Image: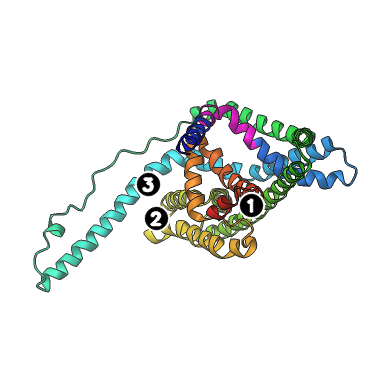
Amino acid sequence: MAQWGAVHFVAVVAVIAAFWFARELLVPIFVALFLGLVANPAVTRLRRWRVPRWIAGMFVVFGGVAILIALGSQLVAPATEWAQRAPQALREVAPKLRGIVRQVDAANKAAASIADAAGAGDAPAARDSHPGVAPADAPTPPSLWSAIRAAPALLAWFGAVILLGYFFVVFGVDLQYRAIALLPDRQRKKLTQEILRTIEVELSRYVMTISLINVGLALALSLAFWLLGLAPGDALLWGSIGGLLNFAPYIGPVLGVITLGVVGVVAFDSPLQMALPALCYLGLQLLESEVVTPIIVGRRWRISPLVILLWLVFCGWLWSVPGVLLAVPVLVSFKIVAERVEGLNGWAKVIA
């Protein structure tokens, strides 16, 4: 038994190592497979209206990409403006933070003086503190040339993913049926077909539900930032970024708070105004995660938060950003399989 367990451990380590070393090949394939699984139910509905599969796949896959590009084009102008302002804006962050530190230090000194006047004793720490803060070097602005050089490779990666996703949608079903036909008995064929169909439907529902929730969050954030005083284009930009970051549970919101904290420091002058963008994001995100999502989603995709966080960290280490985005769909798929395959039911209960 111990030898069998050691064999399993070595096999798992070997698989993880293979996935890590082959990540440049496997990541676009798995992302495209995920897109194909999500798009397939919509293509199947179009097939019921006598639409050829290759046309239905083109409409769903490339139509979805066109919609995303059209929506993203609305953010190009404010994003370009922020990119142009970034070097100067980053240089303004340190002086503003030093001003806040000086105000806090002055308040501490005033409190110490009051305490001394009241006979509270010496306050050496307050007296010995220095109001000035050693000036820090200005942050190095991001290299625009590096981004330009990386653009062709990034575009090629996205193009490969979209094309692979289209081929998975058009030809993946026939390949799936031929693979199922190789199974030895009718019961296994039926179970495998049911599992694959359930994964397609559930992943499609999951992506659609989470996308609608995050779009609502992005719109609410954009409205809040506009009311705080940001320009409409800037408010829409940072609201959209907040909604996109919410696709990565736990990790995304942390990055969102940090990012919007920097935005607040750059865009405003008073300490309270600086903190408001991050606080608005944090409040709306907590409302979404603790109230809105549980009401809409219920227990359909309920998985332990600790399991999700550990799996996100692991997938992020293994495949970086694509791994984080694929982590929850992979967990949902594993739960669907574990609930239906004898011998894996215990794992479904562990991660629930």
The chief SS type of the magenta part is: helix
Nearer to the camera, 66 or 211: 211
Q: What element carries label 3?
A: helix
Upstream in sequence: badge 2 or badge 3:
3
The residue positioned 78% from the left and 33% from the top of the image is: 178
Upstream in sequence: badge 2 or badge 1:
2
Alpha carbon distance from label 2 to label 1: 54 Å
Q: Name the residue under label 2.
A: 269
Q: Position of residue 322 (x, y in %)?
A: 56, 38
Type of amino acid at the residue the image marks with label 1: Glu
* Residue 20 covered by magenta stretch: yes
Is any atom of residue 165 visible in this view? yes
Q: What element carries label 1?
A: helix
Mark 2 or 3: the one toward you: 3
The residue positioned 59% from the left and 27% from the top of the image is: 25
Type of amino acid at the residue the image marks with label 2: Asp
Q: What element carries label 2?
A: loop
Type of amino acid at the residue the image marks with label 3: Val
Question: Which mark is drawn over residue 339?
Answer: 1
Residue 302 located left or right of residue 130? right
Mark 2 or 1: the one toward you: 1
Q: Mark 3 points at which residue?
A: 93
Residue 145 located left or right of residue 180? left
Q: Residues within 10 Å of mark 1 (few under 14, many from 20)?
A: some
Nearer to the camera, 278 or 235: 278
Residue 173 location, quadrant: top right
Residues rendered magenta in the picture? 18-31
